[in-house]
């Protein structure tokens, strides 16, 4: 599939919404495609593979750029939960293409007294082709000349998370 941006824009929110409702929780996820599959990487496992640390902004930038190159992906997606000042909760979707197209979407969600997600709006409440919800998305596809030790770290991290990638076949 040549246009990963279009696929992620159209299908990533639907696929992720189904996962959220199935597990009753919103977890941060990074998504990218190769020619046959969409991959979802749930970042909650990073403390297990990153010496007890989560995924900070710099590591996310490096790792997303590394994965996009390794998989030949021309677009990357990101989803995570947010809360507004009025305690409105929403899932923020950001998609960025290699040629700098941006797209963002919000879907409100509701939780019960046990903080389990009970509903996620199907229709987005806010959509933008200009402003990402999370600005880290703008760092995707930056040209980075990785030092050898950083590249080795990213390769090792990739090997550790490979078996945890959730794979969705692309429609051809």
Image (cartoon, rainbow, N blue to C red):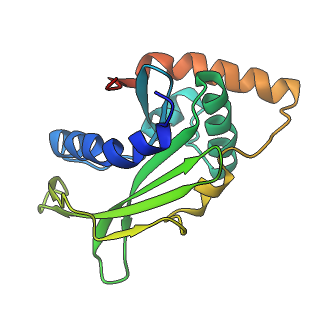
**Residue 51: image location, x then y, percent:** 61, 31
Q: Is residue 143 left or right of residue 2?
A: right
| Quarter of the image where one finds residue 158 | top right
Picture layout, residue 77 above or below residue 47: below
The answer to whether residue 39 is visible is: yes
Q: Residue at (41%, 23%) from the top-left corner? A: 37
Q: Front-most of 168 and 46?
A: 168
Q: Front-most of 17 and 48?
A: 17
Picture layout, residue 125 above or below residue 21: below
Q: Front-most of 164 and 48?
A: 164
Q: Residue at (32%, 42%) from the top-left corner? A: 11
Q: How many numbered marks have been drawn onto this rendered protein structure? A: 0
The answer to whether residue 165 is visible is: no
Picture layout, residue 43 above or below residue 172: below
Q: Is residue 60 left or right of residue 119?
A: right
**Residue 164: image location, x then y, percent:** 42, 22
Q: Quadrant of the C terminus?
A: top left
Picture layout, residue 77 above or below residue 115: above
Q: Is residue 123 left or right of residue 5?
A: left
**Residue 115: image location, x then y, percent:** 19, 57
Q: Is residue 105 left or right of residue 120?
A: right
Q: Residue at (68%, 52%) from the top-left corner? A: 139
**Residue 7: image location, x then y, percent:** 40, 40
């Amino acid at each position: 599939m040549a246009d990963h941006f279009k696929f992620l824009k159209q299908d990533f929110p639907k696929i992720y919404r189904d996962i959220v409702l199935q597990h009753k929780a919103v977890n941060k996820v990074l998504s990218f495609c190769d020619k046959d599959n969409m991959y979802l990487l749930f970042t909650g496992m990073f403390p297990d593979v990153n010496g007890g640390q989560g995924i900070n902004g710099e590591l996310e930038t490096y790792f997303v750029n590394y994965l996009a190159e390794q998989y030949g992906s021309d677009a990357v997606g990101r989803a995570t939960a947010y809360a507004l000042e009025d305690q409105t909760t929403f899932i923020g979707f950001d998609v960025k293409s290699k040629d700098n197209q941006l797209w963002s979407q919000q879907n409100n969600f509701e939780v019960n007294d046990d903080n389990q997600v009970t509903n996620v709006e199907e229709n987005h409440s806010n959509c933008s082709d200009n402003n990402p919800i999370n600005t880290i998305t703008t760092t995707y596809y930056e040209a980075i000349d990785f030092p050898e030790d950083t590249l080795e770290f990213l390769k090792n991290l990739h090997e550790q998370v490979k078996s945890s990638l959730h794979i969705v076949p692309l429609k051809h």
